[in-house]
Image (cartoon, rainbow, N blue to C red):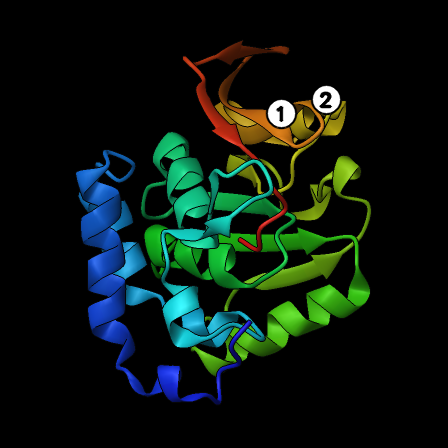
Amino acid sequence: MTTRGSATTRRQPKPLRTALVNELSAQGIIRTPSVKNALRAVPRHILVRDVSLEEAYAVHWPAADDGHPMPNGPTIAAVLLELAQTLPGMRVLKIGSTTAYPSALLSHLTGEHGEVTSMNTDGDLGQATADQLSLTGYDTIRVINGNTRDGYADTAPYDRLISFNGIWDVPPAWLCQTAPDGRLVVPLRMRGSVYRVLALTRANDHWEAAPPASQRGHGEPV
């Protein structure tokens, strides 16, 4: 993998972000203006580590062992954000992710009157997330560490709860911490690295599922 200090990073990031958004739009992955604007604005190359500038804005990583190209972080993020339908002023709990990129995207979507809480189980990862966000001006995001299955009750209820980690089942705490008519977006693992992305809406004491979108998961950094 090429590091950020190589010659390939001498290109400007803005045209690469624009090309990424154009390609994801052409594929029908991005459909809403707000998500397009967020991906155009957020500097992913600063929010990820050990990735070249061109790799940071690639739609796919090189092909996996089965010959299929693996979706890159911006592609996965776009799928989840389109399903989440996050609006300005919303309160959001973001679960997981190996980078600060999704938190910054959500902060852009919720705007100055919104509130984003980023939760990870790994303390070192949480600190790295906070450090990366401070470099890009997204320092109003609350970064916490803990058992993600317990959610974070202190700032609940949430209008949106979005998991960037694949999970086997939906923890009961997430339902309790989602506002009435609030939405959960989660990659539900079916077997191995294959998962189905679900958008669920809270209806009293249970979830109601929106039509799912199928994606494959390969452990790529989001």
- The amino acid type of the residue labelled 1 equals Leu
Q: Residue at x 57, y 30 (%)?
A: 186
Q: In which quadrant of the rendered view does residue 82 lie? A: top left
Circle 2 — which element?
loop
Circle 1 — which element?
strand
Task: Pick the residue in front: 109 or 192.
Answer: 192
Q: Measured from the top left, where is residue 16 in percent x and y?
A: 26, 68
Labels 1 and 2: the sequence-earlier one: 2
Residue assigned mark 1:
188
Q: Is residue 62 visible?
A: yes
Task: Pick the residue in front: 216 or 34.
Answer: 216
Q: Residue at x 63, y 46 (%)?
A: 219
- The amino acid type of the residue labelled 2 equals Asp
Task: Pick the residue in front: 41 or 155.
Answer: 41
Q: Measured from the top left, where is residue 39 in percent x and y?
A: 31, 57
Q: In which quadrant of the rendered view does residue 156 lie? A: top right
Q: In which quadrant of the rendered view does residue 153 lie? A: top right
Image: 45 above or below 181: below
Q: Is residue 90 left or right of residue 26?
A: right
The quadrant of the picture occupied by the N terminus is bottom right
Gap between marks 1 and 2 measured at Cα: 7 Å
Mark 1 closeness class: few <14, some 14–19, many ≥20 residues within 10 Å = many
Task: Pick the residue in front: 140 or 41.
Answer: 41
Image: 134 above or below 76: below
Q: Residue at x 43, y 66 (%)?
A: 55
Mark 2 closeness class: few <14, some 14–19, many ≥20 residues within 10 Å = few
Residue assigned mark 2:
169
- Find residue 79 and name its label: none
Q: Is residue 130 left or right of residue 154?
A: left
Q: Measured from the top left, where is residue 33 in percent x and y?
A: 18, 45
Q: Residue at x 20, y 62 (%)?
A: 18
Q: Is residue 139 visible?
A: no
